[in-house]
Image (spheres, coloured by chain):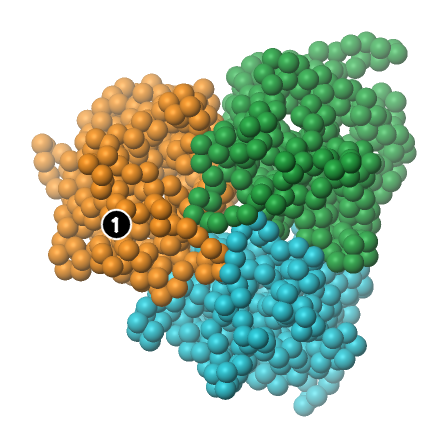
Chain colours: A cyan, B green, C orange
Amino acid sequence: MTPASAVCLFFILLVPLAPAGLALINTGLGRSRSAAHAMLAALCVMAAAAIVYACCGFAWQGFAGGAAYTLRAAGKQWNWIAAEPLFLRGHPLDGSPVSLVVLLQMLSAGLAALIPLGSGADRWRLGASCASAALLAGCTYPLFAHWAWGGGWLAQFGSNYGLGRGFLDAGGASCIQAVGGLTALAVTWTLGPRRGKYATRGLPAAIPGHDAVVVLFACFLTLLGWWGLNAAGAILFTGAEPGRAVLIAVNTLLSAAASLLAAVAITGLRFGKPDSSLCANGWVGGLAASSAACAFVTPAAAVAIGLVAGALVTVTVAYIEWPLSIDDPGGAISVHAAGGLWGVLALGIFARFPDNVSGQWLAQLIGIATLLGCVLPLTYALNWLLNRIYPQRVDPEGERQGMDLYELGAGAYPEFVTHNEEFTQQ
Amino acid sequence: MTPASAVCLFFILLVPLAPAGLALINTGLGRSRSAAHAMLAALCVMAAAAIVYACCGFAWQGFAGGAAYTLRAAGKQWNWIAAEPLFLRGHPLDGSPVSLVVLLQMLSAGLAALIPLGSGADRWRLGASCASAALLAGCTYPLFAHWAWGGGWLAQFGSNYGLGRGFLDAGGASCIQAVGGLTALAVTWTLGPRRGKYATRGLPAAIPGHDAVVVLFACFLTLLGWWGLNAAGAILFTGAEPGRAVLIAVNTLLSAAASLLAAVAITGLRFGKPDSSLCANGWVGGLAASSAACAFVTPAAAVAIGLVAGALVTVTVAYIEWPLSIDDPGGAISVHAAGGLWGVLALGIFARFPDNVSGQWLAQLIGIATLLGCVLPLTYALNWLLNRIYPQRVDPEGERQGMDLYELGAGAYPEFVTHNEEFTQQ
Amino acid sequence: MTPASAVCLFFILLVPLAPAGLALINTGLGRSRSAAHAMLAALCVMAAAAIVYACCGFAWQGFAGGAAYTLRAAGKQWNWIAAEPLFLRGHPLDGSPVSLVVLLQMLSAGLAALIPLGSGADRWRLGASCASAALLAGCTYPLFAHWAWGGGWLAQFGSNYGLGRGFLDAGGASCIQAVGGLTALAVTWTLGPRRGKYATRGLPAAIPGHDAVVVLFACFLTLLGWWGLNAAGAILFTGAEPGRAVLIAVNTLLSAAASLLAAVAITGLRFGKPDSSLCANGWVGGLAASSAACAFVTPAAAVAIGLVAGALVTVTVAYIEWPLSIDDPGGAISVHAAGGLWGVLALGIFARFPDNVSGQWLAQLIGIATLLGCVLPLTYALNWLLNRIYPQRVDPEGERQGMDLYELGAGAYPEFVTHNEEFTQQ
């Protein structure tokens, strides 16, 4: 194992703290009567995604320079899907860059699959969320990740048309965050809002999260997880020197910090008092936005990216709830889709390369268009199809009882006295 | 410090997340009125084990190739206990492999000592659990760890009789998990069941855990802890290349994932609904089972090991409770003893070595026989003796009040209204 | 990046678990109705400190051998403040030792700034705590850290007067713990006690923490965080070999373990039952005390340092509450100021160097005198001044409602029934 691979491996070891943190955030922002369900679903989704990705996801994602299918269009060869063997055969897991890609992506696919859980809180069946995660890890995720990270056609815009270095994303603002966030949007379309959310003449009812402490504690864990994602991704997918990990860590921290403080300021000005849930969303939104550009910008630019992300998240959370009338309890669409897309764009705006290539912003815009025009319809179609075969939403009776009691047979906190009735409209 | 030592050191740094996770699991699966006691006992047990191991445990465990006492039997020299100086003298803690063994084992001994806390929940006195931990870290643990990891007679079956590579255990399925799990069994024998557990005509009462969220959150932490245990152990005790850590991490994750999904499926089929406590136990059981073989099997075999572990844990949890009538609130016996023993056996079944040695399965069976025939009686004798000198079980009044109030003078959650009376029979 | 830098980087990656742990400890030791506020304040303080430190703090802290202003006094040149460019310009963040100092110090400044939050619990306004953190990260912290770590006049006592190696502190017992703890003292002076604390004829009312489980869980996390602080600091600021990190990890663990057990024994003897809050404080006090000397003492000395720390923390907590009548809900003054100062002194007592230099104890005493005679007045003056401009204490109405409701508009646990009235005197 080379020193660069060792450095990369240790960053990968931090990655599971990202799904651990998101699981806590989703749970804490949901209801107490769905808390055990939310955590168990997170663990199951991570497990299912890891297994499915090992079975077939990696075969289709591959890696830059590996076997792949190409199409000829507009006089150029475009690489559109990898052709690796199934079940991780053919590549010894011996510390080589390819083996590190396998390990990182088994976790990243799980992280992307975990994002929609926040949006489906309190009404998404456990089995359906696992099946949806399997579709993500086995199809949507590897496909787009191949295009961006596996030497696919988005990455080829650099060599084929001279658009900067082609579509670029160090830590997964597109592949992980936006793919996960757009799937969350598709899931909310499929599931519909929680009962009682838009009961009284269309105005949304506020349904507060049940534990702000775990939500805010999770923010600390996500920092470590994102350091892992951003640095390992930058080394494996953009060929960054290991020493650049210091810049990446500084930028990731500054971006999250600026985004948090922006969210505190904006919610404080808007509602008179800062809102702790939105501030936590702001922190994670800053992390999501930092992912693409962290390896290519100055610390000052990272602060700017974070400030915009914090504003964007707080504004879109409100806009999605009303007038769009999309019920997203965990704010996953704003944090991961809006934050991630902003991160992808920000690379086009702020990134500086030693060789002063131009046109990077165009490659980034093409990536965003692909996410919105291609990944979103695909993930919606898959979830719509799944819903026809296996209804994803729990029965009305389950929503009345709470997911814990209905799907798991026991509540998360059986000894604590709760009064959760007041938040539900009959 | 060599690169291999640096890689090993960083895996060791992850290890404390395993006891942190187990402490949360034990606490969450217990009652709210014993929650502070359960966490404080975990911290004290880790502290006591680390100090005792540094004083004398390492002197008796030693390392392969170090000073040791031997016995001649059946015409061979058998190495049965190390003869290192007490108090960590004689070996500078300078990053050498021996110093890494010291650091890893100070933590591993604490982890093994922490396992029985789950079984003794709600009735084991704080002082007695610390004393029991000191006996484990100073006697049982180093003795068996010497046999398996310190060049002792179990490891010598390879060179002395050509049984594969001798008894083999990369990450501690035997030394840590089975030793801890069998001590948990000895502790439940010593303590007896909680009052109210078998009150009504022998049929056990269900006493649910008080916080499923911390239990399931802890599962994420344990993954990191086991990565540390499995990779550091494989490098230090089986001479694995650092690059093999990638295979180990993939296998550990797949084994836990498969075990979790097996537990979800089995409890879902059996009770109609998946049980979140048993699913968490399934996840940790998959980790425990992965420890022995993780460095020597393919990812597909790791999935198979996990599937069996998940089935085994869910079945044995029920069997231990009834008809065996052993009250194990945290499921430590099933998860760590059954899971660990299965992991040891699984290495004999699935491991493939480049030189195609044979007889590995027999060495593994001898190891299991030693654990059951030698370690279990020893740990039971020590705990029985301790119980004579210092009664381990709290007074009936303490069990009525709860451990927090009786032993610490204050509850864990003084501001929250709880209704824990309904789970106790007078 | 050199291997030593890579080792150092990975220790730095563990550091955020120290603020994560302290945030949970502060929150759990406070009231449930201020829990969201306590966590959000911790995140905001870390964010503000990181940004301010990146803007100007590093420019004034600098590093040994960097640009600095000097004063001539007593015939010697004394280096008193660094003269680096603002906004991290001038030093590429490329894995060089200077870049690692930047990353580590952005986190350490946040950690130091987080310590006073425990003392100001339940009455310190969010905006004021962020402003106070900015003053710490931009002024007090870099100033003292320059003196001790940046080649400043305290470090020069070795070369200028032959006092050992000059003032020495591997992991920040002075720069982080004592600076944070003394700022906590200044903050309690500025804020005054919580209402109801000294209501009945001066005798303090006991106001228990609201969640002992998160407090004790956080202790596990702090171990990892302190491993990071101690090892990274030793490598960057005292030139320790990377291999010495093993000694540092062993010493840090032993010191915390001994301190915990001392706290258990002392509180058990004194109150009849061990107190879980004080035991957690003992653990962290042992970590704080280990920081200075961890790289220079034997494991036996680390145990001794921990035993004294545990005794010191439990005794000073009581003494500060009464007769000093300082209301410090989180015990930050005892844990971090008393523990840290003892750690600084302990290096003078226990450290052994290969070249047998003498006078180290005097350099350490000069450091302690500087902290008490220079840093404490400075930080008190800054907080007093801030209080004049922007009152730091919440309105009486806010204290009556709880910080969550008054400053954030929502409680941390809206679905749980709490009875927190009984702990407040009207």
Quadrant of the image for the N terminus of chain B? top right
Q: Nearer the viewer, residue C89 or A425?
A: A425
Q: Residue furthest front?
A: B426
**Residue A378 sits above or below residue B33 on the image:** below
* Left or right, A354 with reference to C160: right
Query: Is B142 situated above or below A257?
Result: above
| Residue A414 appears anywhere in the view | yes
* Label 1 chain ID: C
Q: Secondary structure at mark 1?
A: loop
* Residue C74 percent location from the top left of the image: 9, 32
Which quarter of the picture shows residue A234? Answer: bottom right
Q: Is residue C362 left or right of residue C315?
A: left
**In the displayed structure, does residue C332 sit left or right of residue A11?**
left
Q: Quadrant of residue A377?
A: bottom right
The image quadrant of residue B88 is: top right
Residue at x 28% of width, y 55% of height: C400
Residue at 62%, 79% in the rendered image = A192
User: Is residue C64 at least partly visible in the picture?
Assistant: no
Between A18 and A346, which is closer to the camera in this rendering?
Answer: A18
Q: Nearer the viewer, residue B145 or A162?
A: B145
What residue does disc 1 label?
C426
User: What residue sits 64% from the left and 17% below the top?
Assistant: B387
Residue A122 image offset from top left, x and y in percent: 60, 68
